Image (cartoon, rainbow, N blue to C red):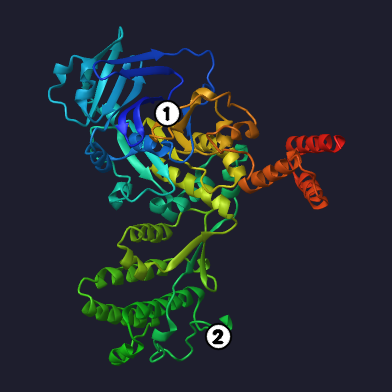
């Protein structure tokens, strides 16, 4: 299956405009207000850039400056049911998508059936059609014959899915955390799921690192950069990240002052590393909760009598103190969910107690990602993912860990975030008959070093060909500001957007040759930046030019200024041109 076309009658700045996403088809739709015309033409290419690739069916890049409409296109393609309902409620919004399934079979999805109804034949066999519709049709002799609703064809409906990835979703789309669950939602459309590092979290990273280190065959034959650093002896590092105000510090030495070391030199501790880590965790949580619960240090005196608890375990002693503090908070704020917070803390302790002793060092937990997966680690990371979706105020109590990875630079970790989110989605059992995936990537190279951006598409293709998943093929549609990604694609695989200055409406602009084009040529296109020079440097060069062409005689300081700036210019063409103009001026004296 392949998504081949989107038409938007009106959605934000996408007005009366269509987008072709496949070099295999040329789809045209025309609406003059009275008549509508739709044509689908199969294109026959002798060669295609992805024809020898086993799984990658096509890649389309959308480019344009901020505000040109890139994200609006991806929203229409990828938003889930709840957000699509909100879109449909907006006045005058009309759109439809066309997919090619196989041979002469196509699928159309849209929000207003009356808009395309005049184009279709055999509509009566469908019966009632809701405004949000998805219909399988046959294209034969330039006519469109309705066959059935998509949701009534299990083979097609449950074999294809769209994954939308972006580094963060806006608040409207992220209105409910359930939107990010990978459970299939019942819808008349193809299934859609959101992927973002914020919601797939560290569990996804851990699982991918474990999977690639243990399950990928022929590692020595894998020549792509993501695996080079995945295959190192990496560790997932869990450290305490707990802040508290010393004004509200509790004296917790009442029952455990003999030999207890919370912070100090290692040879002073009577505990093994795991027990020491847990002791420090519960001690720090006590102090943190105290900072949240009390408004005035004098309040502590009201509860001190309750702290005289005798427990054989220091951990249980601190947990009892925490429970007392949370109950006190509940008395002050009846809406505070003390039970939920306490449950989180107890789950932390229960899971960490099951960790291997070898994981623990002085103040951190080091979990290898090059061995078999640890079910207890998975349980903790899953719990942390769930906590990230709780109310923000509750999170302020229970977010007590920081997680990082050894041997990974910040750029490598950003790349891991992207690939682990994809790995997380592609290895879930969502569809009953998984076959095809459409990946919608909104500026996946954001915040990446230019070198990572340069190799990103190549890495992504190799990743999708390597990953152990039941999906058989992939179509990629991505937005980007990167000329490096565009240089990996022919112009027919690139949609270049511009924005009307007055109306702000989006339109498709012409683009020259892109495949294997040099970056300077691509950067000179207005879709990326207005100039290949930094704005400050550009202004300084213009000042120099104004001085050189000025009819007045130059002072010695002005001549020295010109010579200085010409000497530090790095671009040979600009440098030589300014030198030539300056020499011509000097020769005229």
For image coordinates 50% across by 44% down, the residue present is 215
Crowding at dot 1, Cα within 10 Å, few <14 / some 14-19 / many 20+, comes out as: some
Q: Nearer the viewer, residue 12 or 408?
A: 12
Looking at the image, is 190 positioned above or below residue 362? Answer: above
Q: Say which mark, if any, is on residue 369.
A: none
For image coordinates 58% across by 23% down, the residue present is 513
Quarter the N terminus occupies: top left
Instruction: Please indicate, yes or no, whether residue 55 appears anywhere in the rendered image.
Output: no
Q: Answer with the quarter of the image where residue 264 lies.
A: bottom right
Q: Nearer the viewer, residue 571 or 390?
A: 571
From this viewpoint, which residue is outermost toward the top?
141
Residue for badge 2: 268
Q: Position of residue 507 (x, y in %)?
A: 42, 28
Q: Are marks 2 and 1 in contact (CB under 8 Å)?
A: no
Kind of element beneath mark 1:
strand
Residue for badge 1: 507
Instruction: Please indicate, yes or no, whether residue 369 appears anywhere in the rendered image.
Output: yes
For image coordinates 40% across by 32% down, the residue present is 506
Q: Position of residue 212 (x, y in %)?
A: 52, 45
């Amino acid at each position: 299956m392949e998504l081949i076309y989107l038409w938007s009658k009106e959605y934000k700045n996408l007005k009366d405009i269509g987008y072709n996403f496949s070099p295999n088809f040329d789809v045209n739709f025309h609406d003059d207000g009275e008549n509508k015309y739709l044509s689908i033409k199969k294109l026959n290419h002798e060669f295609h850039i992805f024809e020898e690739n086993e799984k990658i069916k096509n890649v389309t890049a959308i480019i344009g400056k901020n505000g040109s409409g890139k994200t609006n296109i991806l929203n229409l393609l990828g938003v889930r049911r709840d957000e699509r309902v909100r879109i449909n409620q907006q006045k005058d919004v009309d759109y439809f998508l066309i997919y090619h399934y196989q041979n002469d079979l196509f699928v159309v999805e849209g929000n207003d059936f009356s808009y395309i109804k005049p184009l279709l034949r055999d509509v009566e066999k469908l019966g009632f059609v809701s405004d949000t519709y998805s219909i399988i049709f046959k294209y034969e002799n330039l006519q469109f014959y309705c066959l059935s609703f998509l949701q009534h064809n299990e083979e097609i409906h449950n074999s294809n899915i769209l994954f939308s990835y972006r580094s963060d979703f806006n608040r409207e789309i992220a209105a409910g955390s359930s939107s990010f669950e990978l459970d299939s939602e019942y819808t008349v459309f193809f299934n859609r799921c959101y992927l973002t590092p914020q919601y797939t979290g560290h569990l996804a990273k851990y699982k991918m690192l474990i999977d690639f280190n243990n399950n990928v065959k022929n590692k020595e034959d894998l020549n792509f950069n993501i695996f080079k650093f995945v295959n190192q002896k990496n560790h997932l590092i869990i450290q305490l990240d707990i802040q508290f105000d010393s004004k509200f510090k509790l004296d917790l030495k009442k029952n455990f002052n003999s030999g207890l070391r919370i912070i100090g030199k290692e040879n002073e501790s009577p505990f093994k590393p795991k027990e020491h880590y847990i002791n420090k965790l519960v001690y720090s949580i006590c102090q943190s909760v105290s900072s949240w619960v009390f408004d005035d240090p004098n309040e502590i005196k009201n509860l001190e009598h309750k702290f005289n608890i005798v427990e054989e375990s220091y951990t249980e002693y601190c947990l009892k103190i925490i429970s007392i503090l949370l109950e006190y908070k509940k008395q002050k704020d009846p809406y505070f969910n003390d039970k939920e917070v306490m449950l989180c803390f107890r789950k932390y302790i229960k899971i960490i107690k099951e960790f291997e002793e070898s994981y623990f060092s002085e103040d951190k937990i080091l979990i290898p990602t090059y061995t078999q997966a640890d079910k207890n680690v998975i349980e903790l990371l899953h719990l942390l993912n769930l906590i990230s979706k709780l109310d923000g105020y509750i999170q302020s109590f229970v977010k007590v860990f920081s997680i990082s990875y050894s041997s990974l630079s910040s750029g490598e970790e950003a790349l891991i975030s992207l690939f682990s989110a994809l790995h997380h989605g592609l290895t879930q059992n969502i569809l009953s008959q998984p076959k095809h995936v459409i990946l919608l990537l909104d500026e996946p190279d954001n915040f990446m070093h230019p070198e990572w951006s340069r190799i990103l598409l190549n890495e992504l293709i190799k990743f999708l060909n390597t990953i152990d998943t039941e999906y058989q093929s992939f179509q990629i549609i991505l937005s980007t500001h990167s000329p490096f990604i565009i240089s990996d694609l022919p112009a027919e695989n690139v949609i270049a957007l511009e924005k009307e200055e007055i109306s702000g409406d989006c339109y498709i602009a012409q683009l020259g040759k892109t495949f294997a084009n040099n970056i300077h040529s691509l950067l000179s296109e207005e879709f990326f930046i207005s100039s290949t020079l930094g704005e400050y440097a550009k202004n300084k060069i213009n000042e120099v030019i104004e001085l050189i062409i000025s009819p007045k005689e130059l002072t010695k300081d002005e001549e020295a200024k010109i010579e200085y700036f010409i000497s530090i210019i790095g671009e040979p063409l600009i440098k030589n041109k300014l030198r030539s103009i300056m020499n011509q001026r000097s020769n005229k004296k």
